[in-house]
């Protein structure tokens, strides 16, 4: 029996904690690096181009997430299916899934580029983006979406590598692309005075580099995840299975992003200083979020592989381990972000008014961010079990519904019409949604146990 390459992780045997940390830490570093490169855009623009340019770049964040989350949900479907076939050692099904997923990445990237470039101005008008930053925001958004095909290729490819336990090589590729991104940011903005167009172009070039590296990696792979460009096509059966798992995840991502876009629109109504402070704070809290999200990804891959291998007795322990890890990470990093909030915000802006506006967001969201991590992690376990519709419906009611009800009712009252009251909708929705997900998980696991008992040979009922 050939030995596994050392970048793969055996998720189906032995202790869970050590392997989960080995899986999660490179993923955490990858996500943090990605945010650092995005933060480089914000920092360079904020310090060398001004607060209007900072607000223009930052005001696009929730919109970009809304337009990309649909297809990112499909990459989750690919991740679950690849992990399932990998755990079950079904090599042919694994190959068909890999090539279907990478074909989807191409189509989704091209579609997003068309939507982002053609509809940029009108969408920003609908979002009530302040007029003094709107033209700059349109320029940044259109350039950013030119690189969306490369972004989709990297994200689908790294999802496939994660499914087999490889989180280290995507980290190396992101680091290489990110160094280029930072250097080009400084050259385009400081030397050539290209403002938001410069940071947008630097981002696109770095995205293309990471996409080329991930394709090169998969083409050199052996076994089920080896990529052959001439075999790129959509297998109907595998496409349907990816969609069955990924589409509800896509809609869930869209629902969250839609509620965030509406919240962003409400934040925009308080003026460019609040928008800039909100953007800077959101970038800081993003580091906490992606660190916790590594355990959401861990729960998906570990649960999927164990389901494929028939190791269902490990499912509960995987969730408990991931939840304990995410609580520790959320509490430590979230409160650290608040304690160091003022100097951290000073990296993004020289304006004390913008920094003060940013602290209002950090005080509410980062202190309670562990709740968000707990909610996401249990969603990861549910998706790994193959249940994607349930978390979508729960999130629709528990998270998005609550936020939208608040915005369209209480927020319109003078007593509650403040930016702080907007931020408080986040922790409230996290608590409610986590509790509902936990109940769903318990019911699903009980039914799985009952089916296992019914199918056991010689069992008396």
Image (cartoon, rainbow, N blue to C red):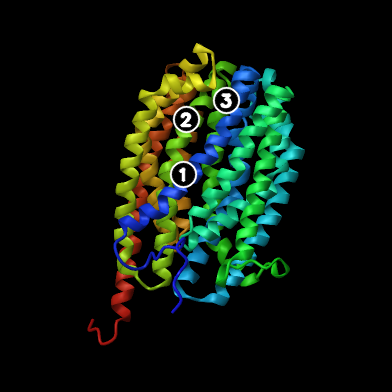
Residue 26 versus residue 221 in the image, above or below: above
- SS category of the residue bearing label 2: helix
> How much space separates mark 2 and mark 1, taking CA atoms?
15 Å
- SS category of the residue bearing label 3: helix
Q: Are marks 3 and 1 in contact (CB under 8 Å)?
A: no
Few, some or many C-alpha atoms within 10 Å of disc 2 (few <14, some 14-19, many ≥20)? many
Number of the front mark, 2 or 3: 3
Q: Of all residues shown, which one is farthest toward the bottom? A: 458
Kindly tell me whether residue 372 is visible in this rendering. Answer: yes
> How much space separates mark 2 and mark 3, taking CA atoms?
11 Å
User: Can you identify the residue that label 2 sits on?
Assistant: 284
Count of marks, rendered view: 3
User: Can you identify the residue that label 3 sits on?
Assistant: 43
Q: Of all residues shown, which one is farthest toward the left? A: 460
Q: Nearer the viewer, residue 2 or 46?
A: 2
Horizontal side of 61 relative to 445 (left or right) equals right
- SS category of the residue bearing label 1: helix
User: Can you identify the residue that label 1 sits on?
Assistant: 29
Residue for point 58% across, 23% down: 268
**Quadrant location, the N terminus:** bottom left
**Quadrant location, the C terminus:** bottom left
Residue for point 61% across, 52% down: 154
Q: Quadrant of residue 303?
A: bottom left
């Amino acid at each position: 029996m050939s030995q596994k390459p050392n970048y793969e992780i055996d998720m189906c045997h032995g202790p869970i904690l050590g392997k989960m940390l080995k899986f999660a830490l490179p993923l955490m570093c990858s996500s943090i690096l990605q945010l650092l490169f995005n933060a480089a855009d914000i920092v360079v623009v904020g310090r060398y181009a001004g607060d209007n340019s900072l607000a223009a770049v930052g005001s696009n964040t929730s919109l970009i997430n809304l337009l990309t989350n649909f297809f990112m949900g499909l990459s989750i479907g690919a991740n679950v299916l690849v992990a399932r076939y990998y755990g079950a050692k079904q090599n042919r099904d694994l190959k068909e899934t890999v090539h279907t997923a990478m074909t989807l990445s191409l189509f989704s990237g091209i579609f997003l580029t068309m939507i982002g470039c053609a509809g940029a101005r009108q969408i920003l008008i609908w979002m009530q983006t302040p007029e003094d930053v709107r033209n700059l925001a349109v320029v940044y958004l259109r350039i950013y979406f030119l690189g969306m095909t490369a972004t989709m290729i990297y994200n689908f490819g790294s999802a496939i590598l994660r499914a087999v336990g490889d989180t280290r090589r995507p980290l190396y590729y992101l680091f290489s692309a990110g160094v280029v991104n930072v250097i080009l940011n400084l050259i385009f903005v400081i030397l050539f005075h290209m403002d938001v167009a410069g940071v947008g172009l630097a981002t696109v070039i770095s995205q293309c580099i990471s996409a080329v590296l991930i394709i090169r990696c998969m083409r050199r792979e052996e076994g089920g995840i080896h990529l052959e460009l001439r075999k790129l096509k959509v297998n109907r059966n595998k496409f349907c299975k990816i969609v069955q798992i990924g589409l509800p995840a896509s809609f869930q991502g869209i629902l969250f992003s839609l509620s965030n876009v509406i919240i962003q629109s409400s934040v925009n109504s308080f003026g460019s200083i609040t928008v800039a402070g909100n953007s800077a704070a959101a970038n800081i809290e993003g580091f906490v979020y992606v660190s916790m999200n590594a355990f959401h990804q861990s729960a998906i891959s570990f649960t999927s592989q164990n389901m494929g291998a028939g190791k269902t007795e490990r499912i509960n322990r995987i969730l408990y381990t991931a939840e304990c890890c995410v609580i520790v990470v959320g509490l430590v990093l979230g409160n650290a972000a608040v304690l160091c909030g003022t100097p951290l915000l000073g990296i993004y802006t020289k304006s004390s008014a913008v920094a003060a506006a940013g602290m209002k967001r950090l005080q509410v969201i980062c202190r309670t961010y562990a709740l968000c991590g707990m909610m996401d992690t249990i969603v990861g376990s549910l998706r790994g079990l193959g249940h994607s519709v349930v978390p979508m419906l729960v999130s629709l009611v528990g998270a998005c519904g609550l936020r939208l009800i608040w915005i369209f009712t209480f927020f319109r009252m003078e007593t509650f019409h403040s930016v702080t009251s907007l931020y408080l909708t986040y922790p409230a929705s996290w608590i409610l949604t986590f509790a509902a997900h936990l109940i769903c998980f318990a019911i699903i696991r009980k039914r799985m146990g009952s089916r296992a008992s019914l199918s056991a040979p010689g069992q008396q009922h």
